[in-house]
Image (spheres, rainbow, N blue to C red):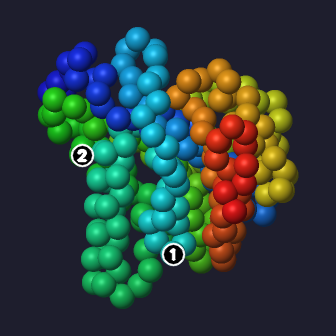
């Protein structure tokens, strides 16, 4: 049984607002997220609460973006990290990205179906590399999962998917993917109040993970470095 959240309570739940994107390029994966956190409810009004990075390290070879209720996303990530450490200690080998993705989805599936006054609503994009190559997975709020072969957006996808539909192609390079991700963020932040305050961009290749861009908003966009 799922409990419906009280309207007054919902207004005070911290959410990530959010636009997170993942693009599969011919030479790797681009993973990016904005920095805005909001409070809000069914009114459609977003009240800016704070800023934070929404790309988190899971293992040395994997990253995840978060969307949804911030505290639930953080709890899920802590649980995943602990489960991975135990699994690797027992097996004495590194967890593959596919195994990590299905561990994620099992936890999300359990959380959304556990009765609670405040339902656990989270959405993740998981990217990483192993001996089989680079991978991108979309892990939905209902405990669903699919491996992304092109591109995906979570949080505020309606304003962004149209740009991807027109401009994405499977043969684009990482550099082209980074430019497209930046264009999507610039376009979406003016139309979606839950998106803004800069963004972080990461690149996942077959043997490395690198943060290639971090920008925050003060009075204008400036580089964090």
Q: Nearer the viewer, residue 161 or 13?
A: 13
Q: Is any atom of residue 128 visible in this view?
A: yes
Name the residue carrying label 1.
Answer: 60
Q: Nearer the viewer, residue 91 or 225?
A: 225
Q: Secondary structure at mark 2?
A: helix
Q: Is any atom of residue 203 visible in this view?
A: no
Q: Secondary structure at mark 1?
A: loop
Name the residue carrying label 2.
Answer: 110
Q: Which mark is residue 25?
A: none
Q: Are marks 2 and 1 in contact (CB under 8 Å)?
A: no
Indicate the quadrant containing the C terminus: top left, top right, bottom left or bottom right: bottom right
Q: Nearer the viewer, mark 2 or mark 1?
A: 1
Residue 89 vs 198, above or below: the answer is: below
Q: Give me the residue at 83% from left, 35% from top.
A: 167
- Left or right: 30 as drawn, with respect to 193: right
Corner quadrant of residue 84 = bottom left
Residue 123 vs 107, above or below: the answer is: above
Indicate the quadrant containing the N terminus: top left, top right, bottom left or bottom right: top left
Which residue is most to the bottom? 92
Q: Give me the residue at 52% from left, 28% from top.
A: 194
Q: Give me the residue at 39% from left, 28% from top.
A: 39
Q: Position of residue 103 (x, y in %)?
A: 35, 59
Q: Position of residue 56 (x, y in %)?
A: 48, 59
Q: Position of residue 73 (x, y in %)?
A: 36, 48
Q: Earlier in the sequence, mark 2 or mark 1?
A: 1
Q: Residues within 10 Å of mark 2 (few under 14, many from 20)?
A: few
Which residue is most to the front? 219
């Amino acid at each position: 049984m799922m409990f419906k959240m009280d309207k007054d309570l919902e207004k005070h739940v911290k959410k990530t607002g959010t636009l997170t994107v993942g693009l599969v390029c011919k030479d790797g994966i681009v993973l990016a997220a904005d920095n805005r956190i909001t409070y809000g409810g069914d009114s459609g009004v977003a009240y800016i609460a704070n800023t934070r990075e929404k790309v988190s390290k899971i293992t040395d070879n994997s990253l995840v973006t978060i969307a949804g209720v911030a505290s639930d996303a953080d709890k899920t990530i802590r649980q995943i990290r602990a489960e991975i450490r135990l699994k690797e200690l027992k097996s004495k080998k590194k967890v593959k990205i596919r195994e990590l993705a299905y561990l994620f989805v099992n936890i999300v599936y359990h959380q959304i179906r556990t009765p609670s006054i405040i339902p656990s609503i989270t959405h993740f994009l998981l990217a990483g590399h192993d001996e089989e190559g680079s991978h991108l997975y979309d892990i939905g709020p209902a405990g669903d999962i699919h491996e992304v072969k092109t591109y995906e957006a979570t949080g505020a996808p309606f304003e962004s998917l149209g740009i991807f539909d027109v401009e994405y192609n499977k043969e684009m390079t990482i550099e082209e993917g980074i430019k497209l991700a930046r264009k999507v963020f610039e376009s979406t932040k003016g139309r979606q109040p839950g998106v803004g305050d800069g963004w972080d961009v990461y690149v996942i290749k077959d043997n490395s993970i690198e943060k290639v861009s971090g920008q925050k908003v003060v009075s204008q966009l400036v580089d964090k470095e």
